[in-house]
Amino acid sequence: MTFKQTTKMLMQLSAYNMKIIFANKFIWFLLAAFIFFAIFMFTAEWNGTVLNEGLMYNLLLFPCILLIFYPTVFGIQNDEDNRILEILFGIPNYKYKVWGIRLLLIYIIIFFTLIVFSYIGNYLLYPISPLGMVAQLMFPALFLGNLAFLVSTITRSGNGTAVIMIILGIAIFFLSSGYLSSSPWDVLLNPFQIERGLHPAIWETYILQNRIFLIVGSIVWFLFGLLNLQKRERFV
């Protein structure tokens, strides 16, 4: 097979998987994410909020989570609804070849979407480095996205996964606002907003520990999700 044929096949495969994952509904989540981001920017400017990188990170965090929500929560159910789950399980090493590629494609799309949002915020609200900002946002995105993938392999239901993830999200939010606030275990830690009275060197250590925690957690969720996909009889 020539390089051109391989490239064409990979593009067709990617397009097909994206169609299944997003199920023509992702556009609504994308629109909602942009509307929320626009509202957050307008509200911040209207209220005279102090503008800085920490604020921009917080403004982008919710759209980031919203964008990652649908494809990871409803992925398994979309396979079942399209009646291709049995076919996919017939592919050798299905869990690696299909969902490994799918999650990679999801995160790539989310990354470039957030880059666009960041450039909009950069020009309309406060100057930031879009690439650096989005690179930091991808840590909680990977953690929560892979956790949603894991839960979906347990419930096998998009609606069930959505309910569980909303409950977990609320719990994470309250922990991040209270007991775990600005700690290395804070999933929503804002690396651009140093805790008042904390030495910068200690804060940098917190950020490093937090990012390691999120990466390790992401890998663990992903591997457990793949292990659950080995139990074919639970899905078909």
Image: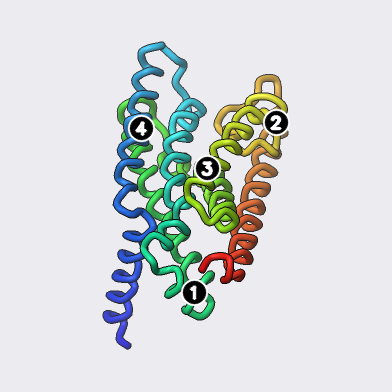
Q: Which residue is mark 1?
A: 89
Q: Position of residue 214 (x, y in %)?
A: 63, 47
User: What residue sits right under mark 2 in the picture?
Assistant: 180
In the rendered structure, find residue 136 and report the number of the disc placed on it.
3
Q: Amino acid at mark 3?
A: Gln
State which quadrant residue 200 falls in. Answer: top right
| In the depicted structure, whether residue 17 falls above or below residue 106 | below
- The type of residue carrying mark 1 is Phe
Q: Amino acid at mark 2?
A: Leu
Query: Is label 3 in contact with label 2 (beta carbons under 8 Å)?
Result: no
Q: Closest to the observer: 221 or 86?
A: 86
Image spot of residue 228 (x, y percent): 62, 64
Q: Secondary structure at mark 2?
A: loop
Q: Are marks 4 and 3 in contact (CB under 8 Å)?
A: no
Residue at 34% of width from left, 70% of height from top? Answer: 13
Q: Residue furthest top?
A: 47
Residue 131 coordinates in the image, percent (x, y): 43, 44
Among numbered discs 4 and 2, the one appearing first in the sequence:
4
- For the residues labelled 3 and 1, the Cα–Cα distance comes to 35 Å
Nearest to N terminus: mark 2 or mark 1: 1
Q: Earlier in the sequence, mark 3 or mark 2?
A: 3
Residue at image mark 4: 122
Q: Viewer-nearest of labels 4 and 2?
A: 2
Q: SS for tag 1?
A: helix
- Cα distance, mark 1 to mark 4? 45 Å
Q: Dot 3 lies on which element? A: helix
Please state which of residues 49 and 232 is positioned toward the viewer in this rendering: 232
Give the quarter of the figure containing the N terminus.
Answer: bottom left
